[in-house]
Amino acid sequence: MATTPDSQNLELSVTDFGPIAKAKIDLRPLTVFVGPSNTGKSYMAVLIYALHQFFNAYSGRKDFRSFSHVEQRQSLDLSEHDLSGLYAWAKETLSDLETTEQEESYSIELPDSVATLIRPIFNNVAHLIEDLEGEITRCFGVGKTKNLIRYLGDGETTFSLLHNISREVGQNDPLGYKVTVTGQKTKIDALIPNTMPLQMDIEDLSVLLWNWNLEWLIEMENMELLKWGSSKAANWNVDWLVEMKNIGEDEIVKQALIDLLRILANSIALDIVSPLSRSAHYLPADRAGVMHAHQVAVRGLIASASRVALRSDSPMPLLSGVLGDFLEQLVALASSSPMRRESKGDNDLALRMEQALLRGTVRVERSEIDYPSFVYRPEGWEKDLPLMNASSMVSELAPVVLYLRHVVRPGDLLIIEEPESHLHPAMQVEFVRQLVAAVKSGIRILLTTHSEWVLEGLANIVRLSELPEARRKGIASAEFALSPEDVGVWRFKPSLEGSGSVVNKSLLDIEFGTFPSGFGDISEDAYNEYAEISSRIEDSK
């Protein structure tokens, strides 16, 4: 049972993390980080990627399964009073559902008596720490999580995942997790409000009603499957029912109620981490260089790995997880892309980008040993051109096209560092439009950028959403409008105290047609300096 994952945003708060002193962002379908170098944009992007990798490992891509591990580590010891209260609540709630129209959404508010029973399931998450630490250190390419603390000493770094569902119903209690890293240890705490509201799909609730009709369970007399008919029996795990033959009705009800708690916990878990349970893909800066040199890099790593056992003074060279994953994906394209079926929508995204920006096509060729080579064929050419001989713009955009064609699927997150690299300003604006097309197809996008043209192109797309469709004819961005709720621009800048950077939301400046980033101040300073130089030249004549 899940809330609509993309309808509500997940809030990520960070303190004293790498160069970041303080940040609070919420993850939108299109999220943009802008600001000077060394202010933490990539740090935040890598953290988000690491969290995706961690939660996706438990998700099974559809259901958040980490709590099945919790279930194996604990038994829920419920008193008769607990069972009675839970049954009364479930009976009332599920009875209401029977009269709910199928097209309606359905809101369940878990009272404190039920929330109290669920809370221990969330609090018992200590076993997740080791896996979480491992994924974070892998993605950053550091030995210990403590190496990411801005001030090591006695300081600590924290990051919190909070879902906005509590505030949407007028509550201030958080729903989420808080991770604290010190020089000695890492801990994770569950933040569960006293009352937990859940907005569920009516279809999911119908399944809950069908499978966990507790009144029906109680009315069963001798567990004879045949008397229920095939339609109901098909919805039950028959083996489980057979095993329950010799268990009294009270035990059956108890097991059903405990399973109901776990289903509710699973749904709340989705509320907390969605959309982090989706797959994420990271395209690092200088991907053009990596595309050109990936064969040399992989061969060098293999050679170093084979020699390290012979030479103790020659440590294995380390790659950050994001770069390692990118290299691994490039290699995997050789064997997966020719055989993987492409959905029409995903292929259209790649094709549109090729037509709008590359003026040609990019392709992966498979060698005899399944190692990839990348080629580019300009429009009108009869032969392919090795990618390393193509323009830097083509090399920079090629991995984006290849990922959209072969790797990324709706619901996934695609992180792109510095999309403006090697692109003419006009191409930067067009690239933003093509990325918005990906967002509209269901792909989530996160960008880190230093480009004012990227922000101005994005501003046009957001502003366009306020114009009725009938009046958009003739506007270049007419088909790419995104609402302000779908776009979040976050400005990273040094704090006034000169200690680390701070992150604030940048709102669309309607008068100037952009998202304020500080670029205008740089331009103004340069102009003022030019005016001062010119004035002194005139005075010296």
Image (tube, rainbow, N blue to C red):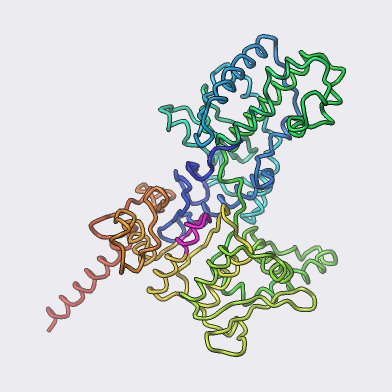
Place of residue 188 in the rendered image (x, y in percent of width and height, measured from the top left): 61, 35
Place of residue 162 in the rendered image (x, y in percent of width and height, measured from the top left): 51, 37
Place of residue 451 in the rendered image (x, y in percent of width and height, measured from the top left): 39, 66
Place of residue 196 in the rendered image (x, y in percent of width and height, measured from the top left): 53, 26
Is 296 rendered above or below residue 37? below
Tell which of 162 and 478 is nearer to you.
Answer: 478
Identify the residue at horizontal 72%, vertical 34% (top origin).
68
Is 300 rendered above or below residue 435? below
User: Would residue 516 be seen by someone viewing this image from the given angle?
Assistant: no
Identify the residue at horizontal 61%, vertical 19% (top origin).
90
Find residue 377 and report its image quarter: bottom right
Q: In the image, is residue 171 part of the stretch drawn in magenta?
A: no
Find residue 463 and report its image quarter: bottom left
User: Would residue 144 be seen by someone viewing this image from the given angle?
Assistant: yes
Q: Is residue 234 left or right of residue 492?
A: right
Extreme residue in the top direction: 81
Quadrant of the image for the N terminus? top right
Total residue callouts: 0
Tell which of 354 and 488 is nearer to you.
Answer: 354
Q: In the image, is residue 436 part of the stretch drawn in magenta?
A: yes
Is 221 rendered above or below residue 461? above
Tell which of 461 and 204 is nearer to you.
Answer: 204
Q: Is residue 317 left or right of residue 463?
A: right
Identify the residue at horizontal 58%, vertical 85% (top origin).
389
Tell which of 474 and 73 is nearer to you.
Answer: 474
Is 475 rendered above or below residue 273? below
Identify the residue at horizontal 59%, vertical 39% (top origin).
182
Magenta residues (range): 435-448
Quadrant of the image for the C terminus? bottom left
